Amino acid sequence: METNQIAFSGSIPLAYEDYLGPFLFEPFALDLVRRIGNDKVKQVLELACGTGRVTRHLQAYLKESVMLTATDINPDMLTIARQKILADNILWDVADMAEMPYPDDFFDLVICQFGLMLVPDKEKALAEIMRVLKKEGRVLFNVWGDSKDNGIWAIGMKVIGSFLGENPIPQNIGPFSMKDESETLQLLERSGFRNIRVDSVKKIGTIESATIAAKGFIEGLPIAKILMQRNQSFIYKIGEALTKELIGQLGDKPTHSPLQAWVFEAMK
């Protein structure tokens, strides 16, 4: 199994779910699930399910007879998801999407929200998705667009970077490593997928206040591990500065952020 270079563990998953889940991920989860349409699927694989933001909508959308395998490489993320979603037709599994423990030609649909960007070897992950999909099966996934089109991300990276002296978000396997949709299209083509389609999806994320948004960004992402190595006053200063900047650019009580993602669909 490949090393998980961006780990969501310890206290991060709960902060991620409570603060960032409704704010950044819920609007895109609904969009992604609605794209399934009326496909007669029997076996569905969700990759990088995290705390179950998409999983709960899949459970509501899919027929009870459909078997859903929900996976993530981070066990602590799965723990949160399993606590929040109780269902007999969901198989929870810790799995690396670049080295999956599933048979060939098994799933009708593979779905993934904001996960492929975090994989070190994206070509290997897509090869694995191709392998486990049945003939005529579909893959459906989204990735973040450019940070400049995602207010909270752009502001957070700038403010935290000003304290750390560098961009705190990794570029080669970070959230914006697949921001160029043309490169991802080429990657899908090289991987052998067909009937490839990409859509730009724009949403407005809403959160109760700029203070909570800053708390989520500092405590609910892997950057938290770096910040926790510093003293508490350092973290407080970052939170204060980020809150101030968010209020100035995105407003307060509530705080609204523009968000943009690319959604890809393809067939085997």
Image (tube, rainbow, N blue to C red):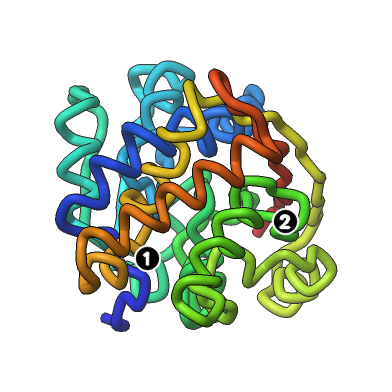
Which residue lies at the image location 54% right of the left edge and 33% below the top edge?
29
Q: Is residue 61 left or right of residue 179?
A: left
Which residue lies at the image location 67% right of the left edge and 35% below the top edge?
250
Q: Is residue 179 left or right of residue 124?
A: right
What kind of element bears circle 2?
A: loop
State which mark lies toward you, 2 or 1. Answer: 1
Q: Amino acid at mark 2?
A: Gly
Q: How many marks?
A: 2
Which residue lies at the image location 79% right of the left edge and 63% below the top edge?
181
Q: Which mark, residue 152?
A: none
- For label 2, the residue is 145
Q: Residue 66: horizontal and vertical position, in percent?
A: 38, 28
Give the quarter of the figure containing the C terminus.
Answer: bottom right
Q: Residue 186: horizontal and vertical position, in percent?
A: 79, 74
> Residue 98: which quarter of the image?
bottom left
- For label 1, the residue is 223
Q: Amino acid at mark 1?
A: Ile
Which residue lies at the image location 38% right of the left edge and 34% below the top edge?
19
Nearer the N terminus, badge 2 or badge 1?
2
> Residue 257: which quarter of the image?
top right
Q: Is residue 131 left or right of residue 261?
A: left
Q: Nearer the viewer, residue 258 or 26?
A: 258
What kind of element bears circle 1?
A: helix
Q: Residue 122: horizontal and vertical position, in percent?
A: 55, 76
Check the image and report above or below for 245 versus 143: above
Q: CA distance from mark 2 to mark 1?
A: 20 Å
